Image (cartoon, rainbow, N blue to C red):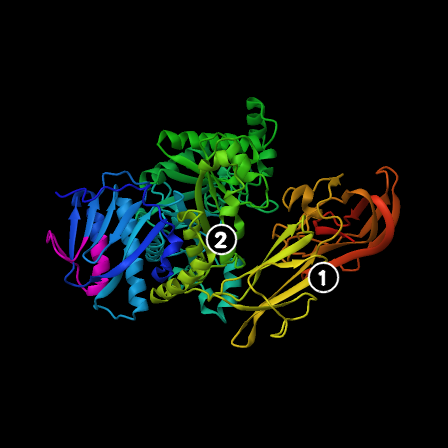
Amino acid sequence: MKRNIFILTLCVVFVSSSAFGQNLLSLIPNPTNVEQKEGTFILSKETRLLIYDEGAFGKEMAYLQQIMQTIFAQGLSLNEDGSPNAIVIQRSNDSFPTGGYRLDINEKQILLSSSHPEGVFYGIQTLKQLLFSVRHQEKQGPESNLSIPCLSIIDSPAFEWRGLMLDVSRHFFSIEYLKRQVDMLAFYKMNKLHLHLTDDQGWRIEIKKYPELTQQGAWRIFNRQDSACMEIGKTNPDFSLDPRFIISQNGNLLYGGFYSQDELKELIQYALERHVEIVPEIDMPGHMMAAISIFPELSCTGSVGWGNTFSHPLCPCNEATFDFLENILDEVAGLFPSKFIHIGLDEVEKNTWEESDACKNLMKENGFEKVEQLQTYFMNRIQGYLSMKGKEVIAWDEVLEDDINPDVNILFWRDWVGEVPKKAVQSGNRIIFVPSSPLYFSRRDSSLYPIYHLQSKFNEIPKDKQQLIRGAQACIWAEGVPSENAANYLIYPRLLALAEAVWTPDNVRNWDSFKQRLASQLHYLDTEQIKHPALTYALIPLISVDQKGKNIRIKLENEQINPVIYYTTDGSVPTERSHRYNGREIAVSGSAEICAAIYDKGAIQLPLASRTVDYHKAIGKPVTYHIPWHKAYPAGRESALTDGLRGSNRHNDGFWQGFTTDLDVIIDMQESTRIKSLSAMFMQLTGPGIYMPEYVEVSLSEDGIHFEKSFTTYNDVPETERALTIRKFSGEINKKARYVKVFVKNKTGHFMFTDELVIY
Ligand code: ACM
C-alpha cells in the first residue's frame, strides 16, 4: 500500500477562492478553497483508477466507476500502479472535517484524498460536476476525452445538516422518485432527506404491528386539495394527480400509496451509499387523523374530529396512546439507521385535552397549570423512550411553547414568532433552520436571493451559541404538489442556492459568482430532465436607512446576470429614457415611489418592482406602545413604526406590524418639532384575516401628558373587499409638538397591519 504521497496541511493552503475565476468551473456549492492552475488533465478510456485503501473506500470507488460508465460506457481499468494518467483515491492520515476532502488535479493525475469515505464521496461529486461543466462548455459528446483544468481544491461543509423535507402524506411520491432526489441531493452535497411520512391525509409507512395503518390509512377519497389540483390539471398536466396512485375500490376511486418496510430498506441503503441520511418523521400527537380514523379511542374524545384549525390530536392522558406510539417507534427505530427521529409536535390543538377528565386528572396529579405542560409531558415520554433506543428527537418549534429539555433538536419554521431561534439556543437546544420564508419551497414566492443569504437568519443567534446551529433544510408541503414534475419545479433551482448557503463558508459565498455558476447548473438540470422554472426578472429592493446621511438607500437585486434596469422615482412605469440603475444604491432623502424593471432585448420585463420610501422626521424616534403588537407579526418590534422600512404587498414580508387590538402609541420627537402631516398605510387581505381599521386618530402634546386632538380619518374600504388593498390614512397638521399620539381603532378584532408612521 502506498499512502501519504503528500502531507496535507489544511491551514497553510488558504487561498481566496474568488481569485481564480472559478466561475468557469461552475461548481455548486462553491468549494472553500480553489486554486486554478495552468494545464489540463486528459480523462479518457485509457485513464487508470488507483485506489489506496479499497477497504475503506470501496463503495465510493464503485460509485465513481458508475459515473465513468455513463461517460465512456465502461469503468476505468484498475490498479496500474505508476500509470502516467490516473485518478488516484487515497486515504489521508490528516484529519479532515466531516465531509472534507482535497482534490488535486495536475497533468498526470487527479488525486482525491480524505480521511473518511464521506469526504471522498464529496470529492467525487466535485469531479462529477467538473466533468459535466467541461463536457457542456466544450460541447463534447459521449465517449470523447475530457480536458479537465488543473487545480487544487480544499473543501469541507460549513454545516452538518443540509437537507430537504418531502411531505409524502398529502401527495404520494414513488420510491424511484425519492432515489432521484437522493442523487440530486448528493450531487449538490446535501445530506439529509427528511420524509414527512404521516399526516391527517395519509399514512405512508408500513407498520407490521398495525397493518390497518396502511391498508386503510394510506388511502382516501379525493379531498378538497386533490380537487383543486385536478382543476388546475385541466390546463397544466403537472397538477393532475399521478394516475399510479389512484385505485378503484368498491366502486370508489381512492388516492394513496405507502412504502413497505422492504422498499424503505432499499431506499435507505441507496441513500447511505450516497451519504444521504433518511430522517423519518411520524407527526404526533397532532396531524394524526389517518391513524385516529382507525383507532378513534386514541383521541381524548374517542372520535375523529376537527378543532378550530387542526384535527383532534392523540390523547396524552391515555396509556394506550403511548403503547401505540412505542410499538410504532420500535419499528421505525429498527428500520431507519438515522440517529434522528422526528416526532412532529406542530400545530397541536389542545382543546380536546383541556376538556378531557383524564387530562384534568393527569394535570392535577402532576401539578400542571397549563395545557402546554401536557405537550411537554407527552414529548418527554416519547423522547425518553427513543433515547433508550439511542435515538435523538427532532421536533417542530412549537415544542418551545413550554420549557423543554435540551436534548431535543428544534426545527425552526415559524419565522413570524420572533424569539424562536434565540429561545431555542438559550436553553441549549440544537437548532435546524427551516424558516418558512424562504425555506418552505412549497410556497411559490421565495426567490433565490433570500435563500442564498440565509446567513442573515443564522446571524440572529448570538455568536457564543452559533455552534448549536446544525444547519438548514428546505420543505415541500405537498397539498398542492400532486406530481414529480410539480415537486421538481418547486425544488429546483432553489435547492442549489440552499446547498451553497449551508456548505460554503460565509466569506467565500458570493451572489454574483453564484448566478454565473447557476447558469451552467441549469443545463445540468435540463440534462437530468428536472423540470424547473427559468430565472425570474423580478427585482428585489433591498432597503436600508442611513440615519447619519438622512436618506433611504435602495439596492435592486435580481436573478439575472448583468441585467439592464431602469427606474423612476415618481411611481411611473420606467422606460429606456428613465434613470439607468448602475448597480449601486439609490439614495432618497425625502419621499419617492421607486418603480423599476429589467429591460431585455429592448422590452420591459415583468414584474415591475415598486416601493414607496420616505426619509421623514420620525425616523429613529422612540415609540411607546400602550398595547403591544401581536407576537405573530412583530416586524421591527419597538422600532417598526419609525424605522423607515416599508412593507411590500406581501403581508408576511417581516415589515408589516400586526395588531388584533387597537393600536395605541406615542412617538417622542425628542424636541418640539414642526409637524406638517402624518400618514400611515394599512393593509386589507381577508385570506389571512387582515382588515382595515375603523379610524386613525392623531393627537399632539408638548409635555406628553396633555394631548390635543389633531385629526381623525375614517376607513372607506368595505370589509367585503377581498383583494389585497393598501390604503393611506393621512391628515394635515401644521403645528409644533414634541409628542405625537396615534390611536387606531380595531373594528373587527381581526388583524390590522401597518408598517410606518410617516411624519413630515
Ligand atoms: C408545519 O409547517 N406545520 C411544520
Question: What residue is shown at x 78% (from left), y 48% (from top)?
Answer: 744
**Label 2 CB sits under 8 Å from any ligand 1 atom:** no
Question: What residue is shown at x 38% (from left), y 37% (from top)?
Answer: 329
- The front one of 510 and 490 is 510
From the top left corner, tell me how far across and down residue 380 is, in percent. 47, 30
Spatial separation of the CA atoms under disc 2 and disc 1: 33 Å
For the image, the number of numbered tags is 2
Circle 2 — which element?
helix
Residue 440 visible, this orientation = no
From the top left corner, tell me how far across and down residue 499 is, in percent. 41, 52
- Image quadrant containing the N terminus: top left
**Part of the protein shown in magenta:** 63-87
Checking the image for residue 451, the label placed there is 2
Q: Residues within 10 Å of mark 1 (few under 14, many from 20)?
A: few
Q: Amino acid at mark 2?
A: Ile
Earlier-in-chain disc, 2 versus 1:
2
Q: Residues within 10 Å of mark 2 (few under 14, many from 20)?
A: many
Q: Amino acid at mark 1?
A: Glu
Give the left or right position of residue 116, taking residue 536 as reference. left
From the top left corner, tell me how far across and down residue 82 is, in percent. 11, 52
- The front one of 593 and 368 is 593
Q: Quadrant of residue 94?
A: top left
Give the left or right position of residue 95, taking residue 742 as reference. left
User: Is residue 359 placed above or below 47 in the rendered structure?
Assistant: above
Circle 1 — which element?
loop
Residue 97 visible, this orientation = yes
Checking the image for residue 721, the label placed there is 1
Q: Quadrant of residue 551?
A: bottom right
Give the left or right position of residue 695, taking residue 647 as reference. right
From the top left corner, tell me how far across and down residue 228 is, in percent. 53, 62
- The front one of 231 and 293 is 231
